Image (cartoon, grey):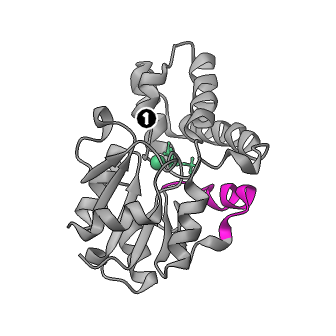
Amino acid sequence: MEIKALIFDLDGVIVDTAKYHYLAWKEIADELGFFFSKEDNERLKGVSRMRSLDILLEVGAVKLDDDIKIQLATKKNERYVGMVKKMPADEILPGALSLLKSAKAKGYKIALGSASKNAMTILNQLNITDVFDVIIDGNKVSEAKPDPEVFLIGAKELNVKPKNCVVFEDAAAGVEAAHNGNMFCIGIGSEENLSEADILIPGFENFTINDFEKIIKKL
Ligand code: BG6
Ligand code: MG
């Protein structure tokens, strides 16, 4: 398999923002009067903000009008952005920056493929915007993962065919999106949530560009 481009999800792959998403959603659940657990939060990974709210409300068995839902999503986002803006640059997940840089140095094209509308804020906060050749975020897509749109736009803007791209994802919806786009997918996390991934690694801590090349050489 000839791999020319690496497409990275953001939340949970490059930075552990899931904890901030969780805290901000939990405050909304608390205000609505129900408990929102960390297990419930797993279902929000990779899905859009409004879909996340629908899942949250489903957990609490709460029904609300659309205008109230928009207000709640806005409130959650303001709290979330407040937290990520205080995040120190060293919250980038271990090994992520070194993998990004060494992949780039080896000539791979690098894209971001994230559902988040806050991707630019987070990348700026981590000082890593320049590592990406192309950044596709929640503001540039109309279909949420598992639709492959975010990755297909990334491949197109990089001028690389989908079959020559590898996606790194931590969410089941993202793995499905990569496969729907005809891309090989490396899952970041555990078998429990990511059994559909082509291969699984726990994170980038002990994962170098040489490890990556060994994997793709065998395909
Ligand atoms: C994804 C996260 O990356 O972005 C989801 O995994 C989140 O949990 C989604 O809901 C949308 O993020 P944002 O920042 O636009 O609310
Ligand atoms: Mg993710």
Horizontal side, residue 158 vs residue 131: left or right = left
Q: Is residue 161 above or below residue 99?
A: below
Q: Residue 203 at what x, y percent from top left?
A: 46, 46
Q: Secondary structure at mark 1?
A: helix
Magenta segment, which residues? 115-129
Give the residue drawn at x 55%, y 65%.
100
Most extreme residue toward the left is: 219
Q: Main secondary structure of the magenta part?
A: helix
Q: Please say whether residue 143 is visible from this viewpoint.
A: no
Q: Residue 29 at what x, y percent from top left?
A: 56, 21
Q: Quadrant of the N terminus?
A: bottom left
Label 1 beta carbon less than 8 Å to ligand 1 = no
Quarter assignment of residue 62: top left
Give the residue drawn at x 30%, y 77%.
164
Quarter assignment of residue 32: top right
- Badge 1 density bin: few <14, some 14–19, many ≥20, Cα 10 Å: some
Viewer-nearest residue: 153 or 165? 165
Q: Quadrant of the C terminus?
A: bottom left
Type of residue at label 1? Answer: Asp
Q: Residue 127 at what x, y percent from top left?
A: 73, 62
Q: Residue 50 at what x, y percent from top left?
A: 48, 44
Viewer-nearest residue: 203 or 47? 203
Give the residue drawn at x 58%, y 36%.
21
> Can you identify the residue that label 1 sits on?
54
Is residue 99 one of those drawn in magenta? Answer: no
